[in-house]
Amino acid sequence: MSTSPASKRVAVIGGGILGVSTAVHLLREGASVVLLSEQGLASGATGRSLSWLNSAGERSTPYHQLRVAGVDRYRTLFAADPGRDWLQFGGGLMWHAEGEQIATETRHEYETAIGYDSKLLAPEQISAAVPGVEAAAVTDSAIFNPGEGWVSLPDLVEFLMDEFHERGGELVLNAGKVSVTVDGGRASGVETAAGQTYPADAVLVACGAATPAVVAPLGVEIPNGSPVSMLVLTKPVEHELKAVLNTPRAAVRPNPGHALALDHDWYEEHIIEHSDGTFSIPEDVVQELADEAAKLIAGHPELKPASWKIGYKPIPGDGEPVLGELGQVPGCFVAFTHSGATLGLIAGELLAGEIATGRKHPMLATFRPGRFS
């Protein structure tokens, strides 16, 4: 007669990096997992993330520690196969607008004080330290963080899903809006838009910016500060850029296939949200972002947008991640954060551990949803 504990059945709502990562880690823990996605995998914020792996700038100590651990997990994955073109560590370069030199120096001093690898570079030092950058675009000094990297999240999701299927996970695509079912005050499973039910011992809600709306019917309020944002992918172009660039008019990173991924926020006022929930933006604004990015690349190559995606960027109301079990509904967990890329692997690991064992991890102590109660 076996004395081993029965395997937990867990339903994960959300086919983005947080849902997929947690699902795979749960399978590694021996749980039985059903993963439900409203549409396809990586069809939401995961598919339009700049996915810069970092803990640059100033934030709370617990958040910084969690992000550093997140980057560490990516380094472990990178070390297993440095040839993956969707995960690279070429550092990060940032600078403020002209005349804001004090802000750059202050940030550098802060990063240095907490042991974060930070180099303050004069414009003439940039080309040697960060190949592929147009040094003339930097009017004052810039900060180079050598330990930072980037990941193409759709490629990472595909990589993780191979293991998901190998370990016997159940995938439900195009499930529409999925809700959490409750029995006796405890999460008991999920129900799809078509009425299909999936009983479960625990549920994880990892629906990006929609997470607060999914848990609201449970009597749980999570402030939502998610803005609309866009990610542009360019057509393939010759360039030597390996670092992520964060500048006053454009954020840029390499993308597999010799393309570049572009992001920023100045164009938000040009985004139009339609009554059916879709978004649009004038094509000349998209090209303007590409033109701004071209100024940052050595040789000023002509950048042509190949595609762009628009939607809500998940940001909790207080800016801090929301990770852990709902106090009002035991058995229901949430994963809602602005830094889904950086935290993708570590958050999935720690949440899976909590769901599988019932033991709360100390690194998530300050991020629990109960802080809003």
Image (tube, rainbow, N blue to C red):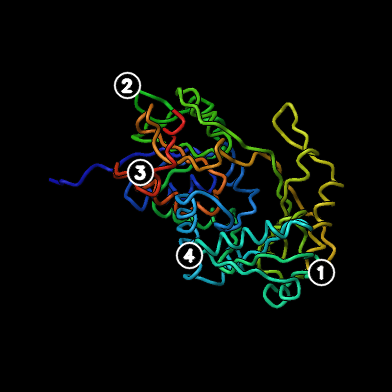
Residue 298 spot, x, y in % from top left? 79, 71
N-terminal of the pair, mark 4 or mark 3, is 3
Residue 161 visible in the current orientation = no
Of residues 41 and 258, which is closer to you in this image?
A: 258
Q: Are marks 3 and 1 in contact (CB under 8 Å)?
A: no
Residue named by callout 2: 184
Residue in the image at 76% along x and 75% along y:
124
In the picture, the disc for residue 77 is 4
Residue named by callout 1: 136
Spatial separation of the CA atoms under disc 3 and disc 1? 55 Å
The disc labelled 1 sits on which kind of residue? Ala
Q: Quadrant of the N terminus?
A: top left
Residue in the image at 50% along x and 25% along y:
216
Of residues 214 and 68, which is closer to you in this image?
A: 68
Dot 1 lies on which element?
helix
Left or right, 162 with reference to 29: right
